[in-house]
Amino acid sequence: RVKEHGRNSVRQFIPEMGVTAISRLNMESAMRRGLERAEFALHYQPKIDLKSGHVVGAEALVRWYHPQIGLIHPIEFIPLAEETGLILPLGEWVLNEACRQQVAWVNKGLGAFKIAVNMSSRQFRQDDLAERVANIIQRSGVDPHAVTLELTESMVMQDVGSTLMTLRSLKNLGLSISLDDFGTGYSSLSYLRRFPIDELKIDKSFINDIHVNPDDAAIAGAIIAMGLSLGLNVVAEGVEKNEQASLLKEMRCTQVQGYYFSKPVDATAFEGFVLKNQARRVGE
Ligand code: C2E
Ligand code: MG
Ligand code: MG
Ligand code: MG
C-alpha cells in the first residue's frame, strides 16, 4: 500500500505559490533561519484509551510557521531536513520542547499522560543517541517513563543489530518505544518479538475503510490480536468516524487517535480538550 501523505491536510492550507515555489537551497537556509528564529512549534494530538475514554497520551507533531508562507506541515520539510542533516538540531528541539511541555502539564495538575515524539531515521542512527536523549530528559526534568519515542517499521528493520543495541539503551533510560505506521513496512515478525518495543500503531491506511471493507477489518483485527498477545499496547491512528472507533473497541484495540476525537492542536487547545474530556467523563 502506498501511504497517502497529507491527504487531507497539507495541500489545502498552503497557497499555490507556497512551499513548491521555494527552491531546495532557499528551503534549506529558510529552515536554518527558522530554527534560529523559533519559527517551529509543536501541535499535540490526544491518544485515547478505548476502554476508559481517558486521554492517556499526546503525540507531538512539528509545525513550521514561516513568516511569509504561513503554516507548513512536516511532510513538506521533514524529508529535506532529513537529507541535509537539519533534522538533528530540529529533532533535538522537538524532543526538548515536548519534554518541557509534559513537565509544565504535570505541574499544572493536568493529569498523567505520556508524551510521544516522532524520530527520523537519521536521528535514530546517531551513535550517541541515547546519551543525547538522556541529557535532554535530565535537563527537562521529565519522568522518562512518561516519554514515548515513535519509530517507523522501516527504520528499525534497516540494521537490526544496531537497532537492537539502540533500543536497549533507550529502554534502559526508562523510555517507551512505539512502532509507527505499522503494516506499511516490512517487519519481520521474529524481530517484532526480539525488539524491546511497547506499542504498535496501526497505520491509518488500514483504518480508513475498516467499517466498510471486511478485508481491512480482518487485517486490523489480526494486527490487534498479535500485538495484544505479545503484550503490546495497540494504537489505531487516523480514526475519523464513530463506526471505526466502536469496531476497534470490539476488537479490543487499546488506544485510538484521530480527527474523530481531535486534530493535532496547539498546547492551549490541547489542555482545553483534556479538561472538557475529563468533565464529560465525570458527567456521563
Ligand atoms: P505520523 O507520526 O504517523 O503522524 C500522524 C499524522 O496523521 C499526522 O500528520 C496527523 O496530523 C495525521 N492524522 C492524525 N489523525 C488523523 C486522521 O484522523 N485523519 C487523517 N487523514 N490524518 C490524521 P502530520 O502532523 O502532518 O505529520 C505527518 C508525519 O510527519 C508524521 O506521521 C511523522 O512521520 C512526521 N513528523 C511529524 N512531526 C515530526 C517530528 O517532530 N519529527 C519527525 N522526525 N517527524 C515528524
Ligand atoms: Mg507518529
Ligand atoms: Mg503514524
Ligand atoms: Mg506517518
Image: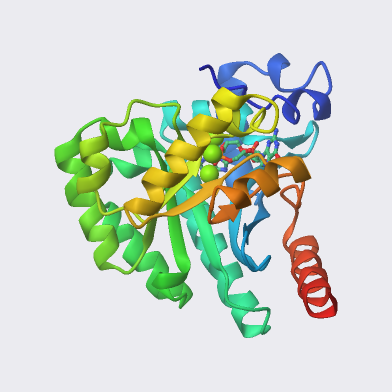
Q: Is residue 29 above or below residue 241?
A: above
Q: Is residue 39 visible?
A: no
Counting the numbered discs, the total is 0
Using the image as rendered, state which of residue 283 and residue 154 is in the foreground. Answer: 283
Image quadrant holding the C terminus, namely bottom right
- Determine whether, in the image, residue 184 is placed left or right of residue 284: left
Residue drawn where x is 40% and y is 53% of the image: 228
- Determine whether, in the image, residue 93 is placed left or right of residue 44: left
Residue drawn where x is 51% and y is 56% of the image: 116
Q: Position of residue 50 (x, y in %)?
A: 62, 59
Q: Is residue 278 above or below residue 8?
A: below
Write down the quadrant of residue 51 in the picture: bottom right
Q: Is residue 227 above or below residue 101?
A: above
Residue drawn where x is 66% and y is 68% of the image: 54
Outermost residue toward the left in this view: 161
Residue drawn where x is 34% and y is 52% of the image: 229
Using the image as rendered, state which of residue 128 and residue 50 is in the foreground. Answer: 50
Using the image as rendered, state which of residue 154 and residue 219 is in the foreground. Answer: 219
Write down the quadrant of residue 211 in the picture: top right
Q: Is residue 232 visible?
A: yes
Using the image as rendered, state which of residue 133 and residue 275 is in the foreground. Answer: 275
Q: Position of residue 180 (x, y in %)?
A: 46, 41
Q: Position of residue 37 (x, y in %)?
A: 65, 49
- Determine whether, in the image, residue 29 is placed left or right of residue 179: right
